[in-house]
Image: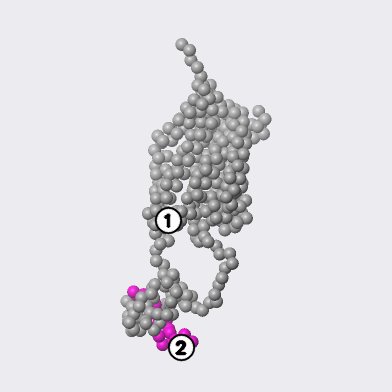
Amino acid sequence: MNTSSPSIAQSVWLVTEREVGSKLRSKAFLISTGVLFVIALVAIVWGGFAAQSDSRTPVAVTPQTASVVSGMDDVIEVTEADSAADAEDLVRSGEVDAAIIEGGPDPFGYRVIGDDSVPNGLISALSVTPPVELLNPDETNEGLRYLVALGFGIVFFMAALNFGATIAQSVVEEKQTRVVELLISAIPTRALLAGKVIGNTLLAMGQILGLAAIAIVGLTVTGQTEVLAGLGAPLVWFAVFFLFGFVLLASLFAAAGAMVSRQEDIGTTMTPLTFLVMAPYFLVIFFNDNPVVMTVMSYVPFSAPVGMPVRIFLGEAQWWEPLLSLAVLLATCVAAIAIGAKIYDNSILRMGARVKLMDALKA
């Protein structure tokens, strides 16, 4: 009976199917993914309703003082009372936090009364301030800027580190149990590496697309159509950049796993990669309002999946910048795959002490 070895494509598919199937059969993976989706949905919906909640100060006014709060509808919720006595009754009953009634000293002509205190926000709103004009107004709310940057940073950090560590640990486990020797006797070494990278990339992208769908549903439910419209293009670019950025990292995580023979030693080779994954997360937390840092981030391959979508959302990126950044990322991805494959190929069968990087590259 004639038997033939599977082709490269068949070998890659077999390993990919094995990686995806093992994860989908894992209750821990399914439960953690479900919990992640629920937390994301709750956070988006809660944030949306919190943003829409009325935070204005309830204040009672009389017909004589109604003009005092004219144009302050964004900070004061006005309740009209027929007289000063009625306004005071509203304060005593707790229906309003304060009342503005006539009879104050010049130049005001009115006075503010409260129960046991007067809201500071009301006093600030009533203070006389000079008109302010901004030559370059910031069109994006600072809080929204921070939340969007933080969201992209957290998703990239969690997905890349979680699945990257899974790849490295899987490689070490197969090497420690010598299962890898059986695998590469049947399929090429680089087909094994490619299958692992592709399989985990599919799983990671599945989570990313799931989170994107949840974000769309959450923003729609809370009526944040303007935010949703602004997030459309950034979400698409984030998915594209994450795809190639994760392939880059996955290849290096697999190489990091191949360099050691015990799970206890994997931290020594994974630490540099962990820092690369964590860097974009901390940078967007502290420097999301710094255009210089964000611009540099959008062109560095390891941080471009976070930096460029944030700049697109803020309207700070020209139309050609995502294309240029993606080209840089693709070139780096090709180089990382080549380096990772060489390290993996030269280290996967070497048992014992940790393989030094230069030895893995020279072998």
Residue 257 sits in which quadrant?
top right
Side of 333 where 1 appears, left or right: left
Disc assigned to residue 105: 2
**98 above or below 47?**
below
Q: Residue at 40% across / 40% down in the picture?
A: 30
Mark closest to the chain's N terminus, 1 or 2: 2
Residue at 47 percent of width and 50 percent of height: 232
Residue occupying the point 48% across, 31% down: 16
Residue 256 location (% of width, % of height): 58, 36
In percent of width and height, residue 195 lies at: 51, 31
Residue sitting farthest toward the front: 319
- Quadrant of the image occupied by residue 351: top right
Q: Is residue 3 above or below residue 231?
A: above
Residues shaded magenta:
94-114
SS at mark 1? helix
Q: For residue 225, which numbered disc appears in the image?
A: 1
Q: Is residue 37 magenta?
A: no
